Structures are given as structure tokens and as C-alpha cells.
């Protein structure tokens, strides 16, 4: 009976710690590793992932910052060179195995001179650290027929996001989840446990396993962002003052539409005003009649009297 009491107490502790784990997985701040101690003693370094150490009751990383780099490039060139450069970069990413390039997005807009639409292309690739400089250099490599100095790099920027805490937090929760799952599995194999307690343990194991799988996906995503770099490339044509896509060319192309809109506005105003024209004409006639009437009254009032009437 004493052994059975100890087993039931350990099962209750395990269920409590599993609930704590499932709650902690939705928190941004790392909770303390107290459940592992409550279920089966202190946490050792062997129970947590590599590159993670235990300080007090918190897990901390022993490496430098985990940075996820993102690069932006804007390159200008002649309109007829956009498609060849886009195709060369896309083919290089897909076929050059030495680059280890992953093509995320590739979009190109075919130009239409009559409609004022110029060609434009965009590329998004993910590369290992060692391949980024080479891929950038290949983008700026002149194509056959390009004059010296072409294409032109108009903008280049690099940003970095520190994912150290996120990776550390996910790894810590993974270690907790695996530990709780193993302990719950061991407790579920006890022969002196009640059936309802074993059912609860099985349910908690299923919940913890689902959480572990979600955390595993998060961990892989974060580590991929750290191990590789994202490069976004914008390929566009040169813009001149006389170009059909320049502000002056765009205004000239839209002039007929602007004229039509203005004419339509005037026509709508006339149509709206038509029902009021008789009233306006009647009001104007009344004003003219009233003005003439008052003018005659004033003339009659100031007219001098005849001599016969005065004698």
C-alpha cells in the first residue's frame, strides 16, 4: 500500500508538470525548470541539448549571438537585359549545386511599350553564408552586349535579427518536453497505478508529444534562418526623363484620360443643372420686372407738376 501511494503521488506530480509544460510553451519568458526536479530529482547537463548549460534554475546558452541575415539589392540596367539577367540568376540558383541555393520566389513582368509598362523582375533566394558574396557578384557580372559600368547597383542593404533567445527558449522547452514525456511514459508502465490515472497519463503524453513536434518545427526554422542568409533582388530598367514610364511620359500618356474625365465632370454638372434652369430663368425675369417697376415708380414720384394745376 505504501508503494502504491508513492506511485500515485508521482503520477499526480507528473500530470502537474505536464500541465506546466503545455502552459509554458505559449509563454515568451522562459519558466524555471522545477518540474523535472519534482518528478524525478535534479536536472543534469546530460538532460538538455548541446550548447546549453544550466545556471541556477535557468538554462542559458554558452555561445555568441545567433544572427539571421537579410540582404536587399536593387540593380538597374537596360530594359532588354532584365529578362536575360533574371533567367541567368534563376538558372544559377537551381542548377549550380556548389551554391546550395534555395529559390524562394522568382517573379518577372514582361514589358509593353505601347501601354507604358516596363519589364521588371524580383528574386528571393536563401543561401549559405559562403555563397552570398559569389551570388551577388554573379548578378553584377555584365551580359553580352552590355557596355562598361552596366548594370548599376542602386541600393544594397543588410540587416540582422538576433534569434539567440528564441533558439535557446525553444531548445529549453524541447528538453523539458522530452524529459516529461519520458518520465510520463515510465510512470504509465507502472503496474500499481489505477486505470483512470493511466488514462490521464496517456492523454498528457499525447498532448506533450504534439507540443514537442511543434517545437521541433520551430527549432528547425530558426536554425535554418541562422545557418543561411536571405537575399532579395530587384531588377529594373533605367528611368529617363523622356521614358514612357517617367513622370512626364506618364502624364502625357494619361492626358487623354484626364481630358475625358474633365469633360465628363462638366457634362454631369450640366445634366444636374437642367431641372433648375426654368426656375433660374423665372427668378431672373422677376428680378428684371421688379427693377423696371421700381424705376417707373421713382420716375413718377419725382416728376414736376404742370403750371395750370398750380394756378
Image: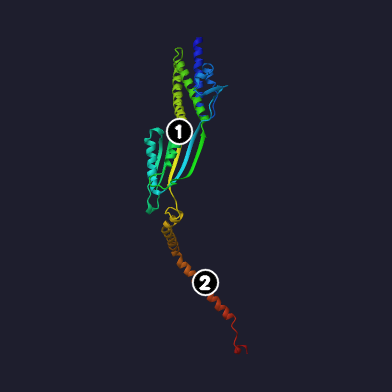
**Quarter location, residue 273:** bottom left
What residue is at 52 percent from the left and 24 percent from the top? 52
Local crowd at mark 1 within 10 Å, few (<14), some, or many (≥20)? few
* In the foreground, 212 or 79: 79
Image quadrant where one finds the C terminus: bottom right
- Given this view, does label 1 or label 2 mark the residue nearer the observer? 1
Q: Which residue is mark 2?
A: 287
What residue is at 53 percent from the left and 20 percent from the top? 35
Relative height, residue 274 to residue 37 (above, below): below
Left-right relation of 277 to 311: left
> How far apart are the two marked residues, 1 and 2, measured between alpha carbons?
89 Å
Q: Looking at the picture, how far across and down is residue 243, in whole percent?
A: 43, 54
Relative height, residue 2 to residue 202 (above, below): above
Q: Looking at the picture, how far across and down is residue 93, in whole percent?
A: 39, 37
Residue farthest to the front, as pictured: 148
Which of pointers 1 and 2 lies earlier in the amino acid sequence?
Answer: 1
Mark seen at residue 130: 1
Amino acid at each position: 500500500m505504501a508503494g502504491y501511494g508513492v506511485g500515485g503521488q508521482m503520477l499526480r506530480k507528473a500530470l502537474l508538470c505536464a500541465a506546466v509544460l503545455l502552459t509554458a510553451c505559449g509563454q515568451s519568458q522562459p519558466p524555471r525548470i522545477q518540474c523535472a526536479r519534482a518528478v524525478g530529482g535534479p536536472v543534469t547537463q546530460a538532460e538538455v541539448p548541446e550548447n546549453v548549460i544550466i545556471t541556477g534554475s535557468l538554462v542559458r546558452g554558452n555561445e555568441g549571438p545567433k544572427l539571421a541575415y537579410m540582404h536587399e539589392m536593387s540593380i538597374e540596367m537596360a530594359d532588354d537585359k532584365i529578362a536575360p539577367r533574371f533567367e541567368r540568376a534563376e538558372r544559377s540558383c537551381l542548377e549550380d549545386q556548389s551554391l546550395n541555393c534555395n529559390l524562394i520566389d522568382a517573379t518577372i513582368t514582361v514589358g509593353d511599350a505601347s501601354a507604358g509598362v516596363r519589364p521588371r523582375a524580383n528574386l528571393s533566394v536563401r543561401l549559405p553564408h559562403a555563397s552570398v558574396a559569389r551570388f551577388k557578384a554573379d548578378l553584377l557580372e555584365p551580359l553580352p552586349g552590355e557596355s562598361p559600368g552596366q548594370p548599376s547597383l542602386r541600393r544594397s542593404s543588410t540587416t540582422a535579427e538576433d534569434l539567440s533567445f528564441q533558439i535557446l527558449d525553444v531548445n529549453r522547452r524541447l528538453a523539458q518536453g522530452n524529459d516529461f514525456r519520458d518520465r510520463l511514459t515510465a510512470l504509465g508502465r507502472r503496474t500499481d497505478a489505477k486505470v483512470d490515472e493511466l488514462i490521464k497519463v496517456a492523454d498528457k503524453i499525447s498532448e506533450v508529444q504534439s507540443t514537442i513536434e511543434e517545437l521541433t518545427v520551430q527549432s528547425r526554422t530558426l536554425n535554418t534562418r541562422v545557418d543561411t542568409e536571405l537575399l532579395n533582388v530587384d531588377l529594373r530598367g533605367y528611368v529617363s526623363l523622356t521614358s514612357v514610364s517617367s513622370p512626364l511620359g506618364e502624364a502625357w500618356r494619361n492626358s487623354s484620360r484626364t481630358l475625358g474625365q474633365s469633360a465628363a465632370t462638366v457634362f454631369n454638372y450640366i445634366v444636374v443643372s437642367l431641372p433648375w434652369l426654368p426656375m433660374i430663368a423665372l427668378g431672373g425675369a422677376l428680378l428684371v420686372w421688379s427693377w423696371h417697376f421700381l424705376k417707373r415708380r421713382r420716375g413718377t414720384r419725382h416728376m414736376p407738376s404742370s403750371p395750370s394745376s398750380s394756378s
